Image (cartoon, rainbow, N blue to C red):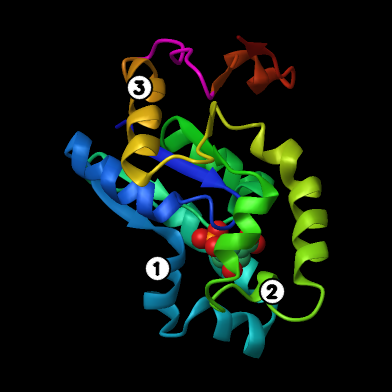
């Protein structure tokens, strides 16, 4: 069954866009952070604080490995999920992976609005996020489709993702459009190639 996986840095809109995309396509929706919080009966921030990031990553890996939605589903993942190789392998098996991209400025503006993200709070958060985003870029670029959402409303971002992903759901190469970068399937062999 073909699902749709959403990845991308913190605050790129994976949950908001994913939820509406699912509605538009008649898919179910799930969010890996939310599933972790339900299973562990603890907010992600509390898991980080009380048990540490390594334990969170272990739980996250276990959850990703267990994902097997019974109906077509849009799966929103956490910002660090796709960095892990075993998660990437499992998620790719579920369906096309779409990476949402926003500028660092937009990210900082959005994460500043709440304290639910342990990696984005505290002193030096802006510098930490800039470094983290830089180190993760190569992994995000391993997604099948990169979709820029800066300056778009959630609805506009959903429309952009839906257009880009529709051919992939039919097993064809992703659509090319403004703000969309389709990564050639040959990335599976280690050679990332953009088709513009
Ligand atoms: C994380 C992002 C968070 C959450 C956790 C770690 C990350 O998800 O999984 O705080 O490493 O980037 P969001 O991307 O939904 O904020």
Disc 3 packing (10 Å; few <14; some 14–19; many ≥20): some
Location of mark 1 (residue): 34
Percent of width and height locating residue 20: 27, 46
Q: Position of residue 77 (x, y in %)?
A: 49, 53
Report the residue that reaches farthest toward the front: 151
Q: Where does residue 161 sit, x and y in percent of width and height?
A: 40, 31
Residue 154, magenta (yes or no): no
Which corner quadrant of the figure contains ligand 1?
A: bottom right
Q: In what quadrant of the picture does the C terminus appear?
A: top right
Return the disc, 3 or 1, that comes first in the chain's sequence: 1
Viewer-proximal residue among 195 and 54: 195
SS for dot 2: helix
Q: Is residue 68 visible?
A: no
**What percent of the width, then of the height, locates residue 26?**
16, 39
Say which element carries label 3.
Answer: helix
For label 2, the residue is: 53
Side (left or right) of 161 relative to 81: left
Disc 3 to disc 1, C-alpha distance: 27 Å
Which residue range is magenta in the image? 171-179
Q: Is residue 38 left or right of residue 117?
A: left
**Who comes first in sequence, dot 2 or dot 1?**
1
75 or 124, nearer to the observer: 124
Closer mark to the observer between disc 3 and disc 2: 3
Tag 1's secondary structure?
helix
Residue that carries the numbered disc 3 in the rendered image: 163
Q: Residue at x 31, y 41 (%)?
A: 155
- Whether ligand 1 has any atom under 8 Å from the Cβ at mark 2 is answered as yes
Q: CA distance from mark 2 to mark 1?
A: 16 Å
Looking at the picture, tell me which residue is in the foreground, 107 or 1. 107
């Amino acid at each position: 069954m073909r699902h749709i996986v959403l990845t991308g840095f913190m605050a790129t809109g994976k949950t908001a866009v994913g939820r509406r995309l699912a509605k538009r396509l008649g898919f179910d929706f799930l969010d890996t952070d939310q599933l972790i919080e339900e299973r562990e009966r603890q907010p992600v921030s509390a898991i980080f604080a009380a048990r540490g990031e390594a334990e969170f990553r272990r739980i996250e890996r276990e959850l990703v490995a267990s994902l097997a939605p019974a109906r077509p589903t849009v799966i929103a993942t956490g910002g660090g999920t796709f960095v892990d190789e075993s998660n990437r392998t499992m998620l790719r098996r579920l369906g096309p992976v779409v990476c949402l991209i926003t500028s660092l400025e937009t990210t900082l503006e959005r994460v500043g609005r709440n304290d639910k993200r342990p990696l984005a709070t505290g002193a030096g958060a802006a510098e930490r996020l800039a470094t983290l985003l830089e180190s993760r870029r190569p992994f995000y670029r391993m997604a099948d489709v990169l979709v820029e959402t800066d300056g778009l409303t959630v609805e506009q971002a959903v429309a952009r993702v839906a257009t880009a992903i529709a051919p992939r759901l039919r097993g064809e190469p992703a659509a090319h459009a403004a703000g969309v970068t389709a990564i050639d399937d040959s990335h599976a062999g280690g050679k990332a190639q953009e088709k513009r």
